[in-house]
Amino acid sequence: MISEGVGFLLRNLPAVLFVIAFAIAAFRRRGPFAERLLAWILLLPIGLTGVWAGLLHIFFPTVAAAYIGWQVSPFQFEVGMADLAIGATACLAFWRGLEFKEAAICAASVFLLGDAVGHIRQMLSSGNFKPGNAGTPFYMDIICPLLAIVLLAIAKRSRSSGRRAS
């Protein structure tokens, strides 16, 4: 029972962290909601997931490959390093201003949305519908960067209209 729960958590980590990010942003009342949610989205589903995926690809390539439906490849080390870099940058952005967050979102969005395109290509060309290719990671690769872009736009618009009102 416990191992099933841990397995579920690990298979769905990005979505679980996404829900936690929303909950924390909703209950903490400091600052505008868009900025709070943006910070938590960067830290949890983008940042921690990136670090987790990076470590998985680097240190457990067989497990990562099987979950995604790949063969083990030396390129997993490179993918792992990219995941780690994006994750670490997104985690750092949690404590930084909107300009740093904007740069982190740019890098994460290019990587994650590109990942989503790769997942779609694998679904169409190879019929790869393994959970790591067509499941939670695929959906989070789309939802998280798009939401981060929208939240950043709202936060920037809110700040610029606040400056005009002053």
Image (spheres, rainbow, N blue to C red):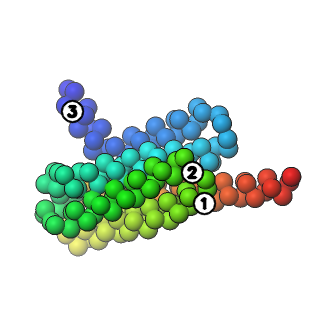
Query: Foreground residue, 55 or 125?
Result: 55
Amino acid on which the number 2 mark rests in the picture: Arg
Amino acid on which the number 1 mark rests in the picture: Glu
Q: Which disc is residue 13 wearing?
A: none
The residue at the point 26 percent across, 51 percent down is 55
Which element is circle 1 on? helix
Of tags 1 and 3, the one toward the viewer is 1
Of tags 2 and 3, the one toward the viewer is 2
- Residue annotated with mark 1: 99
The residue at the point 38 percent across, 46 percent down is 48
- Residue 28, by quadrant, is top right
Q: Would you call the spot at circle 1 few (<14 residues within 10 Å), some (14-19), or many (20 or more)?
A: few
- Residue annotated with mark 2: 96
| Screen quadrant of the N terminus | top left
Measuring from the top left, give residue 133's x and y in whole percent: 27, 58
Q: Is residue 143 visible?
A: no
Query: Foreground residue, 40 or 5?
Result: 40
In three-dimensional space, the C-alpha distance between marks 1 and 3, rounded to whole angstroms, equals 41 Å
Q: Which disc is residue 4 wearing?
A: 3
How many numbered marks, from 0 up? 3
In three-dimensional space, the C-alpha distance between marks 2 and 3, rounded to whole angstroms, equals 37 Å
